[in-house]
Image: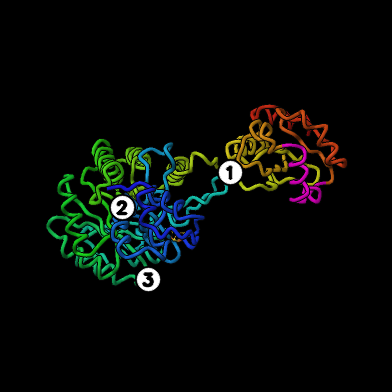
């Protein structure tokens, strides 16, 4: 049963010693009640309170991470059903699947481009989560080795216990993988394997009741890093199973279903349906998403969708303030100014790029606000702009000192001239879409 912050506070030492990094025991209790911190952060809780609190304080969706060679695929730790209620925390990893019936060369050819795919999105590096090796009548250990030759990212291994053991032996041992699937028939063997290799275990059952009893049995056997793998693999089945499990975990604090979920859009057939189901799984409520196809354009769309859903709605996505070079600018190119709200930056940067005109783009520190909002809040004024012109040594990059304000902030031009007396202050268009025409006219 969930405890309130006050109920939890009564069981804490009440010394306000701050060792948990919170100013008071009450503040820590409130965070515990919201399931945003671990009880273990307080080293002074009595054993009696610990026993009472640990059950209540455990996150409703158990967090853990698959790990290998410095890469991590985190899952779980979610506390809300809807992103706008607070935020989602653990971005679902996109995993590309290979089969052991494929040759080592085929496997490497599929893995290598997905492994190498890294794209910069508003200063965030987007990349694939890892790879799945699935048994399909071939040499499982050889397939695992082939993947490892092409990638060091986290792995999900799917097969019979003996095949999985051979695959695990082919790894160097210093990683945490996910094994699938424990079923009503094989769970004892799979649990033993997961324990031996400190692996996470995916549970497969075709009903909620079946999943619940499997989860309880496997936990009793001592494996706690579990993943739910519903047998429903289509659009409707995936949505229903995922939503039910997440609701039960969050709203009822129902522990047997309080685990991340793995989904298999790769099972639905063609690449378009796969991409669509993956998008659905990102929205509701997958932790690991298994795809059979990799293409940069689909990966980009899915990763950006994921980014947009998994960013904190109370904190706008920001780009790094600084000077950005667009179309290889030289010392006579103009310096355009904007704020570090990602959408503003992208609107401006895309228009400048498509204009073909070489330009410098000065992105100021404006707490992630758009131009007008930042201006109204006093975060984008002549002083801020002048400060960042100096901070980023913009004057060293140009001979012709033309600085272009966004049209909506034309009112700043007088003050900016005072702040930057060596510069020629120009006023650009109000809308980003008009930037190409403006640049052509002033160039
Ligand atoms: S470490 Fe424990 S005792 Fe100290 S302030 Fe935090 S909750 Fe209170």
Residue that carries the numbered disc 2 in the rendered image: 56
Q: Is residue 386 magenta?
A: yes
Q: Determine whether 117 is above or below 285 in the image.
A: below
Q: At 24% across and 63% down in the image, what residue appears? A: 223
Q: Which residue is mark 1?
A: 318
Q: Are marks 1 and 2 in contact (CB under 8 Å)?
A: no
Residue closest to the eye, 250 or 259: 250
Work out whether mark 1 precedes mark 2 in sequence or the reverse, and give the earlier one: 2
- Counting from the top left corner in percent of width and height, residue 7 is at 35, 49
> Which marked residue is nearer to the observer: mark 1 or mark 3?
1
Front residue of 2/173: it is: 2
Q: Quadrant of residue 67?
A: bottom left
Residue 174's mark? Answer: 3
Q: Is residue 379 magenta?
A: no
Colour convention: rainbow
Crowding near pointer 3: few (<14 within 10 Å), some, many (20+)? few
Q: Position of residue 399 (x, y in %)?
A: 84, 46
- Mark before the other along the chain sequence, 1 or 3: 3
How many angstroms separate mark 2 from mark 3 (CA)?
32 Å
Residue reaching furthest to the right: 422
Q: Which residues are magenta?
A: 381-398
Q: Earlier in the sequence, mark 2 or mark 3?
A: 2
Image quadrant of ligand 1 equals bottom left
The x, y position of residue 120, in whole percent, is: 55, 49
The answer to whether 195 is drawn above or below residue 443 in the figure is: below
Within 10 Å of disc 1 (Cα), the crowding (few <14, some 14-19, many 20+) is many
Q: Residue at x 87, y 40 (%)?
A: 421
- Mark 3 falls on what kind of element? loop
The quarter of the displayed image where residue 200 is located: bottom left
- 419 left or right, relative to 174: right
């Amino acid at each position: 049963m969930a405890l309130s912050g006050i109920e939890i506070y009564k069981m804490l030492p009440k010394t306000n010693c701050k060792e948990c990094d919170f100013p008071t025991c009450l503040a820590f209790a409130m965070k515990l009640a919201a399931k945003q911190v671990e009880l273990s952060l307080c080293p002074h809780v009595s054993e009696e309170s610990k026993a009472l609190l640990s059950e209540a304080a455990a996150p409703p969706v158990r967090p853990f991470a698959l790990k290998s060679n410095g890469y991590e695929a985190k899952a779980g730790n979610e506390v809300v059903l809807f992103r706008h209620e607070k935020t989602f925390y653990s971005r679902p990893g996109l995993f590309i699947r290979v089969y052991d019936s494929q040759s080592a060369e085929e496997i490497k050819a599929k893995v290598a481009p997905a492994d190498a795919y890294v794209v910069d999105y508003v200063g965030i590096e987007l990349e694939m989560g890892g790879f799945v090796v699935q048994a399909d009548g071939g040499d499982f250990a050889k397939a695992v080795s082939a993947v490892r030759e092409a990638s060091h990212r986290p792995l999900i291994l799917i097969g019979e216990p003996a095949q999985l053991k051979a695959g695990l032996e082919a790894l160097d041992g210093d990683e945490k993988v996910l094994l699938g699937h424990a079923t009503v028939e094989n769970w004892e063997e799979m649990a033993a394997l997961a324990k031996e290799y400190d692996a996470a275990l995916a549970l497969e059952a075709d009903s909620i009741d079946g999943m619940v009893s499997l989860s309880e049995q496997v936990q009793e056997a001592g494996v706690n890093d579990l993943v739910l793998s519903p047998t429903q693999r289509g659009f409707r089945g995936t949505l229903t199973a995922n939503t039910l499990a997440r609701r039960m975990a969050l709203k009822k604090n129902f522990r047997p279903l309080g685990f991340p979920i793995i989904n298999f859009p790769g099972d639905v057939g063609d690449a378009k349906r796969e991409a669509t189901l993956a998008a659905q799984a990102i929205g509701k409520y997958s932790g690991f998403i298994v795809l059979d196809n990799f293409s940069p354009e689909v990966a980009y769309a899915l990763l950006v969708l994921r980014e947009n859903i998994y960013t904190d709605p109370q904190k706008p996505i920001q780009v790094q303030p600084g000077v950005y070079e667009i179309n290889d600018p030289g010392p006579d190119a103009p310096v355009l100014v904007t704020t570090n709200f990602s959408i503003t930056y992208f609107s401006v940067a895309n228009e400048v790029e498509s204009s073909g005109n070489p330009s410098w783009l000065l992105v100021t520190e404006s707490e992630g606000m758009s131009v007008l909002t930042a201006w109204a809040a006093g975060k984008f004024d002549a002083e801020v702009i002048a400060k960042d012109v100096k901070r980023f040594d913009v004057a060293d990059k140009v001979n012709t000192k033309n600085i272009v304000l966004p049209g909506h902030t034309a009112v700043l031009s007088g003050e900016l001239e005072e702040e930057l007396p060596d510069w020629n202050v120009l006023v650009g268009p109000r809308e980003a879409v008009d930037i190409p025409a403006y640049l052509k006219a002033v160039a």
